[in-house]
Image: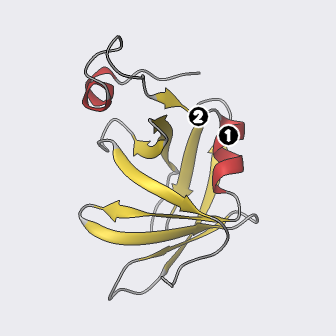
Amino acid sequence: MRHVLTGALMMLSTSAFAQPVAVQLDAEEVTQLLSGNTAVGLWEGTPYRQYFGTDGVTLFAQPDARTTRGEWRVDPENDEYQSLWPGDTEWEGLLVMIWMDEYYWLSRTTPPTPFEVLEGEQLVAE
């Protein structure tokens, strides 16, 4: 199922005729993109690196903080990335969008948040 989050997508593309439209990745594309790789970006203004193990383990690292270990999966019904962190009781989902060759996390509560994907486990910047 493809989600349309009009307000958030308007931030990504002001006119479907003037610019390319953001596209949601499906479950298979999200799995392929993240499995065994590291996402790098800013989360709430702080740099982060997040590794997605092929075994469903994810590691989230930020400067001057302990690395957090959680779990990740992809929900094929909603075509969304989901994570479960220590203390959580429910899986939290984010859509993965692509717009003009850039990836974005997005949900009803998360504004379009850009990230790039590095091949393999790269929790430490080189």
Query: What's the distance in space between the residues labelled 1 and 2, CA to CA?
Result: 6 Å
**Above or below 68: residue 39:** above
Q: What amino acid type is highlighted by mark number 1?
A: Glu
x, y percent for residue 6:
31, 20
Quick one: SS at disc 1?
helix
Residues at circles 1 and 2 in contact by the CB criterion of under 8 Å? yes
Residue type, label 2? Leu
- 12 vs 3: above or below: below
Where does label 2 land, which residue?
25
**Few, some or many residues within 10 Å of mark 1 (<14, 14–19, 20+):** few
Determine whether 57 is above or below 63 in the image.
above
Secondary structure of residue under mark 2 = loop
Q: Is residue 124 left or right of residue 15?
A: right
Colouring chosen for the image of the structure: secondary structure
> In the image, 44: left or right of 23?
left
Question: Residue 123 at x, y = what percent?
Answer: 53, 79
- What residue is shown with label 1? 29
Viewer-proximal residue among 126 and 114: 126
- Image point 64% across, 75% down: which residue? 121
Question: Which of the numbered marks, if any, corresponds to residue 58?
Answer: none
Residue closest to the eye, 115 or 89: 115
- Disc 2: CA contacts within 10 A as few (<14), some (14-19) or many (>=20): some
Q: Position of residue 112 (x, y in %)?
A: 33, 42
